[in-house]
Amino acid sequence: MLRYVPDAARALEQARARGALVHLLGPVTSKAQALDAIGTALNFPAWYGRNLDALHDCLTDLSWQPTGEHVLIWTGHRQLETADPDGYRAILEVLDETTNPNRPLSFLLADT
């Protein structure tokens, strides 16, 4: 699930209050940086190929992560939108279409 939130700190507080495992992602300015940062934030395995297909594969698996709800909070996401609009849209498409019923994963895009 992909959604926008106005305040990252509040979203972090709410996610932790319900017991979710929170992963943080800061501003990036290229698609390659975003792919690396998402992989780092979610501790992707060494075989992660740092491309959109590999991103999709890892996000639908997450077998290396503990069970339970996971929340990725991406602050400063608009920096990538400004620097690389096509890369930004491509990554958001993958994030939006990714689901895993065994390990629920939400993506929160925060401006602050």
Image: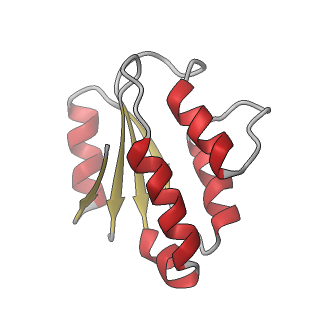
Q: Is residue 33 above or below residue 104?
A: below
Front position in the image: 34 or 6: 34
Q: Is residue 48 visible?
A: yes
Rendered image quadrant of residue 110: bottom left
Quarter of the image with the N terminus in it = top left
State the count of labels. 0
Please name the residue shown 79% across and 32% down the image: 47
Please name the residue shown 54% across and 25% down the image: 62
Residue 40 % position (x, y)? 64, 45
User: What's the colour scheme?
Assistant: secondary structure
Left or right relative to 46: residue 80: left
Q: Is residue 96 above or below residue 82?
A: above
Rendered image quadrant of residue 32: bottom right
Rendered image quadrant of residue 56: top right
Q: Is residue 30 above or below residue 95?
A: below
Q: Is residue 40 visible?
A: no
Please name the residue shown 48% across and 67% down the image: 89
Residue at the extreme bottom of the image, as rendered: 82
Q: Is residue 9 above or below residue 81?
A: above
Residue 63 % position (x, y)? 57, 18
Please name the residue shown 43% across and 75% down the image: 78
Quarter of the image with the C terminus in it = bottom left
Residue 25 % position (x, y)? 50, 55
Left or right relative to 72: residue 37: right
Residue 33 % position (x, y)? 67, 63
